[in-house]
Amino acid sequence: MILDDVFEQKNEIAKAVENELEKAMSAYGYEIVQTLIVDIEPDVNVKRAMNEINAAARMRLAATEKAEAEKILQIKRAEGDAESKYLAGLGIARQRQAIVDGLRDSVLAFSENVPGTSSKDVMDMVLVTQYFDTMKDIGASSKSSAVFIPHGPGAVKDIAAQIRDGQLQGRMV
């Protein structure tokens, strides 16, 4: 019998021992009422091998559970990262929409309040304003080093033309 089966079938073994003892002892006038198997004691080496098998099985199970937990953590991190990027994209889209709405309202208000100006004139003024704001930000930044940008009325007009050309080329692509 396999040792694992011995531990599982202790009651059947006790019954078999009882039957055999009953046959042998009835000739002498003894009656066997019940036999009990209290403890099964395998060889020390067999015990050690069984303990090692059980320990290895538990280690395998623990490693599987740990890997599953790590997998779940990575999935949740990825889902959180994706949600964060999605929300950041929504925020950027709303910010850009607000800028476009503000520019449109400014162009319309300026065109209505200053007779003889076209939306092109207003956009040129906005570009120049943004140019000066950028120059101010570059100069105020403690991390910036020297930046040489052509400066003067002709240079500003040239920069405005370059920005417009870049936007037109971007629309064509």
Image (cartoon, grey):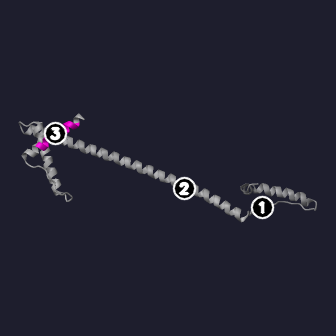
Residue 107's place in the image compared with 14, above or below, is above
Q: Nearer the viewer, mark 1 or mark 3?
A: 3
The answer for how far apart the CA atoms under marks 2 and 1 are is: 37 Å
Amino acid type, mark 1: Ile
Residue 163 magenta:
yes
Majority secondary structure of magenta residues? helix
Residue 54's place in the image compared with 107, above or below, is below
Label at residue 164: 3
Q: Nearer the viewer, mark 2 or mark 1?
A: 2
**Which residue is outermost to the left?**
116
Tell me where residue 167 appears, x and y as whole percent: 19, 39
The answer for how far apart the CA atoms under marks 3 and 2 are is: 61 Å
- Residue at 82 percent of width and 55 percent of height: 16
* Nearest to N terminus: mark 2 or mark 1: 1
* Nearest to N terminus: mark 3 or mark 2: 2
The quadrant the C terminus occupies is top left
- Residue at 25 percent of width and 45 percent of height: 95
